[in-house]
Image (cartoon, grey):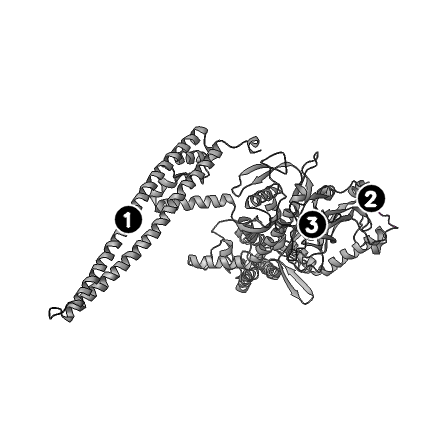
Amino acid sequence: MDGQVIMAYDAEKPARKAKVPPGYKDEAEFCQEVRELFQNGVDYDRENRDQADEDLKFLAGDQWDDDAVKARAGKPRLTINDLPQKIAQVVGDMRINRPSIRVRPAEDADKDLAEVREGLIRAIERDNDAQGVYIAAGENQVGCGIGNFRVGLKYADDTGFERDIEIKNIPDAFAVVWDPFAVERTARDAEWCFVEEAMPRKAFEKRWKDELPSELEVPKADANGWYKRDEVRVVEFWRMKSEPTTYARLATGSTVEVDQTDPLMPAMIVRTSKGQKLRPLPAPVALDDDGEPMIRKGVRKYACMYLMTGHAILSGPHELPIPRLPIFRARGWEINVRAKRVRFGLVRFARDSYRLRNYWRSKSAEMLALAGNGKWILHENTEGDQEAFREAYKNNDDLLIWSGQVSPEFVGPPTLNSAVLQESQILTQDIKDTTGLHDASLGMTSNETSGKAIIARQREGDVASYIYHDNLQAAIAEAGRVINALIPIAYDTARTIRVIGEDEAVKVKRINDPMNPESIDINRGRYDVVVETGASYSTKRVEAAESMMQFMQAVPGAAQMAGDLIARNMDWPGADMIAERLKKALPPGMAEEKDEDLSPEEMQQRQQAMQAAQAEQQQQQAMQMQAGQLALAEKEAQVQKTQAEAIKAMREAEAVGQESGPAVTPLDEALKMAQLRKAQADAVKAEVEAQRSQVALQGDIMDLERKPLEAMHSEADLQNKLNPPTPEADG
């Protein structure tokens, strides 16, 4: 405790007296309420805490209770403890499917800033061994039903003033005393909690020698475990607080906290590591449908911590502008029985089966020990040969000599009771059923014969234990949201940070530096945080390489086109160099290159190639336009010809109708009319096709006219990359 909390939360020096919270007449009244809250939290959860303590002792191998130890005094007392293997199976799945915090842009943010934030959070996780912190909480969660970890602030180094965000493990599952009314699985709705640590009395006196009460000042009934002979209970008392504030909706769509001291010119409130600052609004306040400014009263919630003993405030208050307590709970199973909550992990209901199995295995060992190696029966008058028979089991001599009238008789050892061994096997199956982990889930050979059956049994084990994974992921997601909320507090000045990409590549970014045009405003915008699980990048890379090799075996020709990608995913030395050589051997245009990787000569060659390609493309476009216009003229001529033939046929039909005489029969007239209708239909069809061709041609012409503009834009972009404008030119 010494130094841990003080440095993490910027506590004042011990010589400076802490402040008593408003609403209390003195420090004694506040401390009395704190003691009562602490005791209420312990009493409400006492049964769960006692059972969880028993679970951890049982997991560590203490599996015989006192009565059983006394009953088997002087007899074999075996402990067949394979619980760590079962815990390791569940926790091992957590290690393989590593949770990762993802940042998504929300209002007034963009994808690039979200990626920088995500990379910063990934760097924070690496610096604090966050995966180890998460797994440690998961081990307690699976073992006894609850695990805890925390997020806070610390100084980046001992000599500077910059602060970093830290993620820390709380190894003792019982060190956190929670608000009994917190029902969320991550304790997101907790109004208060305690983080307890037993501090050696000498260390406490060295740091806070004036804060230790005398024996007369602390009655025994009032001490209640706060003060002992060799240690003192020191707690962080975390409490959520709220205060009225004002919020405004800006024209950009974002919501900010504002100060209305000057109603005509409201200022934006920015909370930094040094407190509250006022800055001009980045955009005008939005107006509602009635034309009124969108400003409303609200409440700001924040976490506050006091470092305390049972009768003194050692330090505080220390505030964090976050919407929940910075302590996160990862619970196992929890069942509500009316007003009572029963919490347990993987060990709880397997304890009885383990105790019985240990007893029967010890009983079978006892029976085998008492059985011995068999016995010889000799006549009482046999003399001189007794020692030879008594020591016969110690040597390999096949010959035993005896003298007398009655021959010796050998009596073999009694057979072991099969019910004892059968009971041990039944209890082994009971353990599998209560934990949900069968042989296939543990990688051992079972009675499954097909691959589908083995996978199905493994899936059953994963589903049975998935509640632990899901609850831990929820706690990590809450931690990610708190880290995201603390970034504007910790990174509020101009500085250089490291960001880690999804491929684990490390980059350096300059943030909050108005003098640097490449600097990023890390505090702009709002973001959403989610958690995704999956294999690590290195594992994905190995799996990708294996899949690529299998694909190359199935399609050998693909190796010539994607050999550089395969080599890049290999982990042996020189793979990147081979990938670069294979990439250069590819046909032109097949492998895209980044502009920043090209030399000026290569950039100039690329520009010349683009200009030549654009000229050739323009020539082809002109030829296509000419060919299209000729095709359109042919279509129009064909339409005119068809129309002329239709008119001629109509005139001939009219002439036939005017002629008189027996030469014109009804059949001839019907044929003429059919030819006329066919000619008219052909004319209409040709005209429709001509119009359709004209519309398509006009579309092609518009596309061809647009392509030179696109080419001009591409050429302009290339010129900007080759000759970037200077700030003076922009001005």
Residue mark closest to the camera, 1 vs 3:
1
Pick whichever of labels 1 and 3 is earlier in the sequence: 3
Q: Which mark is residue 143?
A: none
Q: CA distance from mark 1 to mark 2?
A: 97 Å
Q: Which residue is mark 3?
A: 257
Q: In x, y percent, where is residue 605?
A: 40, 31
Asked if one can make out residue 517 in the rendered structure from this viewpoint, the answer is yes
As helix, strand or loop, the secondary structure at mark 3 comes to strand
The residue shown at (34%, 43%) is 556
Label 1 Cα neighbours within 10 Å, binned few <14 / some 14-19 / many ≥20: some
Question: Across the whole image, how many numbered discs are drawn on residues?
Answer: 3
**Quick one: label 1 or label 2, which is nearer the N terminus?**
2
Q: Hey, which quadrant is residue 590 in on the image? A: top left
Task: Tell which tag, 1 or 2, sits nearer the viewer.
Answer: 1
Direction top: furthest residue: 601
Measured as percent of width and height from the top left, residue 102 is found at 56, 48
In the image, which residues are magenta? 208-217
Residue type for callout 3: Glu
Q: Does residue 239 appear left or right of residue 399 in this picture?
A: right
Task: Name the residue beneath numbered marker 1.
Answer: 633
**Looking at the picture, which amino acid does disc 2 mark?**
Lys
Q: Mark 1 belongs to which amino acid?
A: Ala
- Against 316, is 180 above or below? below
| Frontmost residue, 314 versus 420 | 314
Q: Residues within 10 Å of mark 3 (few under 14, many from 20)?
A: many
**Residue 643: which quarter of the image?**
bottom left
Residue 214 painted magenta? yes
Q: What secondary structure predominates along the stretch shown in magenta?
A: loop
Residue sticking out furthest to the right = 216
User: In the drawing, what numbered circle is on residue 17?
Assistant: 2
